[in-house]
Image (cartoon, grey):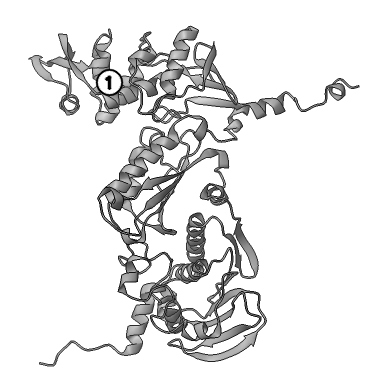
């Protein structure tokens, strides 16, 4: 029998290898702009002509001399690494030396380039395989211009199988936006069919780039946090000259101001490249849980800058998936950073607060609900302090409609809804110290369905048959122990949800009801407790707790910039 195994022709091998790297117009853009970033570019111009399947990327990077241009498109030629040891010291975006060579297999490639310290530039045209077929001097500013023409022209069936042009353009836009977030110091200009498509201006951090991408998000809706953390190698006593300190850069949409219908804006980057890290993404979702409304998701960009020896980039041809060592350590640090970013203190309050809400009508009406009033608010001595000393920046001044606490803030005036502020306090106390206590006498419930009984047992409540269609409840959450509506609260807990849902329900039922009059001492005690919570911006249901009236907004409204004489018509 003849063997069915045979060696593929070299041209087929080359096309398969090229297809692993270049599979779309967006992939071409990605590879070329990453080369520009590695060259130190601070301005990158991308031009697309989709009908001609042509892409051009221009940059102001360091440029290439002729000897480098002669090697640039040869297979596996790169200036980024020298040997196998360098694979664990990668600090550049590209290093495999495959992109330009792959492009010569799939399209026509030409490069214009001039190093910054030379007077002459070069225009080079490449043949299939990466050899130069034409090289001439050219007048060009320092930098590089790479043009790819007739992409996939030698693969007409593949080209026809690609998504519609509109989808490919969307992929290009997403690619550039994600890279721009990782490199906020770069200015981007993108053209399509000789018309300017979009631009992204450089900023001092990713916080200034994100609002240019999500137009409905404003700078004041975001909280940025950049912290230096010990490198895990130091903690595990691994001696490595590379492992020193790592950095965690977090841009988080404040949950009382912006969120999404889908988890499509949880972005993670590592060392300058957007990557897929499902474990870290899940950590972000968990850390922001009970700060957002139901079925809403956070806006979050996380950039980890870690030692190169902690990353294996060879998991995916496009480097979109990686192996990150000590993953559980980074999950812990990300959760801590989100908790820190959500706190209310002078370091985490943006210069411009959410004044857009000031113009909206404040509705004080509260619909009739099952809330029951518990007057007692714990004194500061009764509350467990966080590891950091509490910082009180709010002073209770008055109460509006027995619903909102008017608080004086160093930068203006705040309105705090008392019920949901207290609900946030109680919820976090329950999470930290969930306790079930014996109930004497037992509460008798009637006509519980099997699902309700199972739900009560799931959250730890003891339930026993007491008669026909009657059940005795032997224990109860401690916070509900002294209440007169225990039966109603237990029925509410039996309606479904996990332990966290039960804790929210207990906190909501136990919190001070809107419409209850408080004295200044009680208001101040509540404000102090609320300021110490981990997630003080929203209640566990995702409702915003406070409205800030910034001093600068008040000043503009009352025209305090007017000259006194002129304001009197003098």
Residue at 31% in and 71% down: 85
Q: Residue furthest right?
A: 570
Tell me if 276 is positioned left or right of 393 in this view.
Answer: left
Instruction: Determine whether 376 is above or below 246 in the image.
Output: above
Residue at 14% in and 90% down: 3
Residue 292 falls in image quadrant: top left
Element class at badge 1: helix
Tell me where residue 543 appears, x and y as whole percent: 45, 28
Instruction: Determine whether 322 is above or below 2 in the image.
Output: above
Residue 514 can be seen in this image: no
Tell me if 324 is positioned left or right of 108 in this view.
Answer: left
Question: Which of 374 and 247 lies nearest the eye of the viewer?
Answer: 247
Residue at 44% in and 71% down: 24
- Looking at the rendered image, the quarter that the N terminus falls into is bottom left
Tell me where residue 294 appears, x and y as whole percent: 38, 34
Q: Label 1 neighbourhood size at 10 Å, few (<14), some (14-19), many (20+)?
A: some
Residue, disc 1: 492
Tell me where residue 557 appears, x and y as whole percent: 71, 26
Question: Which of 430 and 245 lies nearest the eye of the viewer?
Answer: 245
Tell me if 278 is positioned left or right of 548 in this view.
Answer: left
Residue 390 falls in image quadrant: top left
Instruction: Determine whether 239 is above or below 221 in the image.
Output: below
Instruction: Determine whether 207 is above or below 535 in the image.
Output: below
Residue at 59% in and 84% down: 123
């Amino acid at each position: 029998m003849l063997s069915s195994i045979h060696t593929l022709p070299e041209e087929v091998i080359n096309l398969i290898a090229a297809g692993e790297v270049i599979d779309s117009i967006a992939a071409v853009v990605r590879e070329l702009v990453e080369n520009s970033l590695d060259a130190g570019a601070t301005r990158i111009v991308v031009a697309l002509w989709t009908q001609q399947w042509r892409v051009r990327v221009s940059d102001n990077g360091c440029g290439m001399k002729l000897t480098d241009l002669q090697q640039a498109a040869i297979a596996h030629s790169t200036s980024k690494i020298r040997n196998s040891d360098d694979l664990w010291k990668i600090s550049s975006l590209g290093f495999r030396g495959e992109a330009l060579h792959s492009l010569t297999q799939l399209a026509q490639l030409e490069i214009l380039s001039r190093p910054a310290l030379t007077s002459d530039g070069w225009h080079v045209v490449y043949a299939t395989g990466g050899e130069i077929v034409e090289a001439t001097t050219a007048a060009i500013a320092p930098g590089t211009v790479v043009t790819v023409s007739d992409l996939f022209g030698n693969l007409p069936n593949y080209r026809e199988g690609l998504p519609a042009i509109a989808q490919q353009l969307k992929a290009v836009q997403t690619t550039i936006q994600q890279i721009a977030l990782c490199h906020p110091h770069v200015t981007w200009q993108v053209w399509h069919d000789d018309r300017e498509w979009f631009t992204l201006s450089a900023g001092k951090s990713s916080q200034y780039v994100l609002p240019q991408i999500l137009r409905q998000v404003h700078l004041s809706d975001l909280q940025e946090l950049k912290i230096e953390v010990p490198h895990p190698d130091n903690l595990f006593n691994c001696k490595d000259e590379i492992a020193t300190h790592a950095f965690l850069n977090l841009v988080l949409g404040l949950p009382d101001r912006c969120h999404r219908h889908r988890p499509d804006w949880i972005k993670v980057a590592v060392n300058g490249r957007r990557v897929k890290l499902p474990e870290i993404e899940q950590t972000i979702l968990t850390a922001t849980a009970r700060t957002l409304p139901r079925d809403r998701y956070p806006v979050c960009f996380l950039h980890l800058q870690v030692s190169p020896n902690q990353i294996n980039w060879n998991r995916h041809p496009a480097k979109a998936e990686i192996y990150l060592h000590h993953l559980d350590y980074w999950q812990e640090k990300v959760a801590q950073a989100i908790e820190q970013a959500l706190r209310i203190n002078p370091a985490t309050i943006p210069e411009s607060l959410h004044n857009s809400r000031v113009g909206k009508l404040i509705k004080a009406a509260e619909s009739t609900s099952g809330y029951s009033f518990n007057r007692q608010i714990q004194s500061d001595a009764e509350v467990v302090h966080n590891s950091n000393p509490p910082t009180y920046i709010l002073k209770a001044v008055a109460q509006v409609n027995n619903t909102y606490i008017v608080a004086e803030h160093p930068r203006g005036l705040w309105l705090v809804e008392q019920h949901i502020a207290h609900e946030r306090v109680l919820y976090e106390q329950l999470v930290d110290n969930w306790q079930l206590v014996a109930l004497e006498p037992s509460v008798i419930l009637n006509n519980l369905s099997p699902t309700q009984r199972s739900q009560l047992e799931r959250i730890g409540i003891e339930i026993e048959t007491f008669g026909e269609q009657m059940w005795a409840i032997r224990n109860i959450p401690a916070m509900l122990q002294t209440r007169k509506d225990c039966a109603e609260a237990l029925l509410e807990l039996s309606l479904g949800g996990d332990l966290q849902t039960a804790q929210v329900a207990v906190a909501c039922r136990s919190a001070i009801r809107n419409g209850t009059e408080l004295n200044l001492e009680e208001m101040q005690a509540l404000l102090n407790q609320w300021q110490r919570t981990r997630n003080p911006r929203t209640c566990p249901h995702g409702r915003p707790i406070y409205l800030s009236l910034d001093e600068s907004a008040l000043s503009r409204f009352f025209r305090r910039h007017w000259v006194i004489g002129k304001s009197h018509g003098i």
